[in-house]
Image (cartoon, coloured by chain):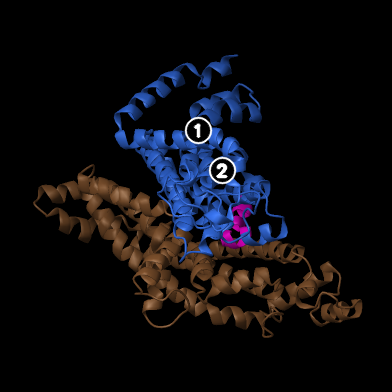
Chain colours: A brown, B blue
Amino acid sequence: MLKFLSVRLTTSLIALTGVMVIVFFLARLTGSPASLYLPVDATDAMVEAFNRQNGLDKPLVSQFVDFVANALRLDFGQSIAQQRPAATAVLSAMPQTILLAAIAMGLTLLLAIPLGTFAALSPNSTLDRGITLFSLFTASIPDFWFALVCVLVFSVSLGLLPTSGQGGLSSWVLPVATVMLHPVGVITQVVRGAMLETLNAGYVQNARARGYSWRRLAFRHALRNAALPIITVAGDRAGGMVNGAVIVSAVFAWPGIGKVLVDAVYNRDFAVIQAGVFVVGIAVILLNILVDLVYAAADPRIRVS
Amino acid sequence: MAARTLSLTPPRRRLAADSRLALLLRSPVALLSALVLIFLLLVAIIGAPLLQDLANTQNLRLRFFRPFSLERGWAYVLGADALGRPMLAQLIVGARTSFLVAGATVALAATIGTTLGMVSGYIGGVVDAALMRISDIIVTVPSLLLALSVLFVLEPSILNLILVLAVARLPIYLRVSRAQTLEIRERVFVEASRALGKGTSSILWRDIRPLVVPTVMTVAMLEIASVMLAAAGLSFLGVGLQRPDVDWGTIVSEGREYLTRAWWATVFPGLAILVTALAANLLSNWMRASGDPLQAAAMGVTASREEAARP
């Protein structure tokens, strides 16, 4: 297990390094921040001073060397737009997003596991077809459009929920629903598929023949064995919630990593883009390792291989 | 010559296609989905060139013209937007772009991804390791962010949108085809081809490709819907397409400005995306269920872990 984890960690870190290199040069291709932060009639001297102050006057290669040297000490430089360390700007936004993703994933599983299991208990029944249709339906709705329609219905027409920002509990409802939208459909399908397979296994059929009730069998015994694919997809979807966070920030002006990253791209705030991608990348790697650990806990056979 | 008889050749495939069509005719939901997709595709191909001018005709007196009224003719039956352009005509012109982007992206990603996946799986070694790391990189970055920054650099255009989306989707095809190649590589008929002195490219093309392609086709069908959603999302964020190019996502993002004044300018383009994606998803769901069980098993293992890579 330890060996497996270390291999996993090494390959992930190699991938992350590759990502950071790409992001570094990509960000600089978006153009010079000077044209964005200085007035149109800025003199050459002003531009030069601005570049020197932000370390943009050196050749690209030496900028990159500096970046790597500082990044190894976890120093990602200063945010031009926010006038504070980039790492601080990113890290202060993370708790919001992690909480949002955690709530959304919790609710997704609470919804998807029973739905998928009931669908698998009576394959090809009306219930099964209904649940399959529902899950394909949620996976087909454009999430940004869903968010807008919800604003229209619940905020504008009914006046029940706030349109944007972050306040009390009610301001969480629409963002959580938007982030959940696609994972619910996908995970329901995966639960159904995994449960169908497990329920056909010999030991389940045997227990069934001995008079165990389907429901008890399904939720007590089969679900544990169907857990692996569910964990895999849930882990992936949790990582993919960064995408949901970007949409949520665009529609609801929700503060979080999505907003920080999108603003940074538009503001050519290189330091924040780099710090953001690094932090998100680390979060995804940690999530993958967590998934592997949960795997091992759910299925003791994995520890051997 | 002997080696040639060992590979799968067309005669049997014809039969398979026929029985598949018969199956489709017996499944009402799948048939309806296929018909809806064909209808939308025809409308997009035939209607878009005809309605191009009408869609761009501004008429400020018809600003926010309300939907469901035939007073101004069919083009205005779904209302008009902030500049008085007819919604229905806009949707039809947008349909062409949306279908073009989704179709071209999937075709490009599937072709390149499958080729790389087969080479990676068959050759193994350094090539395999390098390709898998590259695919890891693509999966690690939040795809929406990657697309956002790339499209921010490049000018928004249909071609750039297709390229960016295709790169983001590559890993799915790469891994599905690699996993299948790994398994096929060990089969006796491939070993026989190798023993008879067939070259690598010939084995890949004549022995392995025919078995990998059906699985990839099923994945591709599933991807049409998600690529369409992703492209619309990018246009909505303002980095996908910009006027004069217009797709359904662009129309939603324009309508959003007037959400409270003219709900139809936001609701209808989104509905168009929803209907198309749902039809594609229903069809691909049916393809998986009715397809070869071996193929379904191969997809189950490999496709799931990469699905979160979607922008």
Q: Position of residue B161 (x, y in %)?
A: 63, 50
The residue lying at 36 percent from left, 23 percent from top is: B19
Counting from the top left corner in percent of width and height, residue B195 is at: 59, 24
Q: Position of residue A141 (x, y in %)?
A: 42, 54
- Looking at the rendering, the stretch of residues picked out in magenta corresponds to B132-147
Q: Looking at the picture, does residue B150 appear above or below residue A93?
A: above
Label 2 lies in what chain? B
Q: Is residue B204 left or right of residue A151?
A: right
Residue B264 appears anywhere in the view: yes
CB under 8 Å between discs 2 and 1:
no
Q: Is residue A164 left or right of residue A191?
A: right
In the rendered image, the residue lying farthest to the top is B1
Residue A280, x across and y down, in percent: 56, 70
Q: Is residue B118 left or right of residue A166?
A: right
Mark in front: 2 vs 1: 2
Callout 1: SS: helix
Amino acid type assigned to the residue bearing label 2 in the image: Val
Residue designated by label 2: B93
The mark that comes first in sequence, 2 or 1, is 1
Do marks 2 and 1 share a chain? Answer: yes
Residue designated by label 1 = B42
A150 w.r.t. B279: above or below = below
Q: Is residue B109 visible?
A: no
At a point 67% along the width and 46% down the height, the residue shown is B159
The chain under label 1 reads: B
Task: Give yes or no for residue B141 being in the magenta stretch.
Answer: yes
Front position in the image: B256 or B53: B53
Q: What crowding class fits label 1: few (fewer than 14 Cα within 10 Å), some (14-19), or many (20 or more)?
A: few
* Viewer-proximal residue among A24 and A199: A24
- Mark 2 Cα-neighbour bin, 10 Å: few <14, some 14–19, many ≥20: many
Q: CA distance from mark 2 to mark 1?
A: 12 Å
